Image: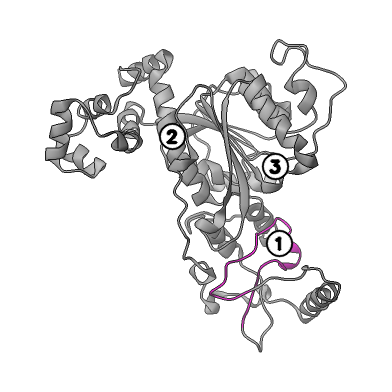
Amino acid sequence: MNAELKPIELIRQARSSHTYQEIARILDVNQSTLRRWRISESVPPHREDSIRQRLLPLIIAPANDDGSFTFIDLFAGIGGIRYAFQRHGGRCVFTSEWNQFAQKTYLANFPHEEGHVLEGDITRVEAEDVPDHDVLLAGFPCQPFSIAGVSKKNALGRPHGFADTTQGTLFYDVARIIAAKKPKAFLLENVKNLVSHDKGNTFRTILQVLKEELGYEVHYKVIDGQHFVPQHRERIIIVGFREPAGFTWEDLRLPDCTKRMKDILLPAEEIDDRYTLSPKLWTYLKNYAAKHKAAGNGFGYGLVTEDSVARTLSARYYKDGSEILVSQGPRKRPRRLTPRECARLMGFPDSFQIPVSDTQAYKQFGNSVVVPVIQEVARIMVPRLMELILRDPASSEQRELTLA
């Protein structure tokens, strides 16, 4: 297999399992154009990336019915990141999530499969016991970093390094697994404020570990979920590749979202009265907002209508729902979102099961990712990942054995 993965070679390889008519349709060109490319053995430079993105999954996916690439899901929550990467052909081989209620929701939507392991506390898992994988995914919590008093010299075979600077944080567990398993790529997700935390020192430490200690090519970008759902939700996405892969954020498609709250709200007749705020709570929230407005602060509840874009849904939504209250007209008190509406606001399909109480569901969706954001990042990551897989002789040999 050609290690350079030139577009014309990808077309030849795709021909082994698809007709030229099918390939032309996939590439959105007519057959005469495809024939001209084959005869000249070249394609226009501006079409090369598009051909790679469309044909690489086509070539690799048939080689393994269980998924074209493997990944692990750390700090998995309810599986929003997993859902996005499965949609692009990945297969999860290991999950870690410590919260028992999140585990319940996760397993309701991603039942145990052969060869898949679900562990609770990742801090108690030896890196060597984590299965080999192509991509590491982690929505890791961010605690303040501290300098550890004791270095673990065996972390990278060095007396100093990430074990010293990140010990005591959950990012350390991400780093030690990357160091041990050396996946071809990773995706990490966190709050926007990670960039500015501790005057930028926390983020600088993370980048130093990923780039200098672990040796990965790293790209990061703050993305607002508002491009895909009616919610202002900014999160930082950090993408890394073990080898140069040609990844660029310029390939990202961030549409001007036209969705509004009316697109995720349930019909009024389906809303139980228990979601309407009590008179006491509504009075408290109005008085609280008035107090802070008088003091010149912007604190207060967020009232939305059908035409609104909501504030960020938080894990504390279960307490009073104040950041996103749905107006029910001037003569009725506002209401909270239902858990199903929260799921929709995060981009989960209606088929996503919610087997827990409202309180736990609010916490889970408030801590989750906007699924379409991760799907879009996965869309531009996966073709680059496929190239690295195809360049790896060990990966090629494994696929040949699978086919045999």
Q: Is residue 262 above or below residue 182?
A: below
Measured from the top left, where is residue 82 in percent x and y?
53, 41
Which of the numbered marks, if any, corresponds to residue 195?
3
Residue at point 63% right, 78% down? Answer: 327
Image vertical order of residue 396 relative to residue 105, above or below: above
Q: Closer to the camera, 225 or 141?
A: 225
Q: Which residues are magenta?
A: 304-328
Could you tell which of marks 2 and 1 lies nearer the N-terminus? 1
- Residue marked by disc 1: 317
Which callout, 2 or 1, points to the residue nearer the camera?
A: 2
Quarter assignment of residue 118: top right
Check residue 104 in the rendering and tell me which mark sits there, or answer none.
Answer: none
Q: Earlier in the sequence, mark 2 or mark 3?
A: 3
Count residues near mark 1 (Cα–Cα under 10 Å), then give few for <14, some for 14-19, many for 20+. many
Q: Is residue 313 visible?
A: yes
* Residue 280 drawn at (x, y percent): 81, 79
Amino acid type, label 1: Tyr
Q: Residue at x 51, y 31 (%)?
A: 71
- The residue under label 3 is which amino acid type? Val
Query: Do the residues bearing badges 2 and 3 touch, measured as CB atoms within 8 Å?
Result: no
Nearer the observer, disc 1 or disc 3?
3
Q: Which residue is under mark 2? A: 382
Q: Quadrant of the C terminus?
A: top left
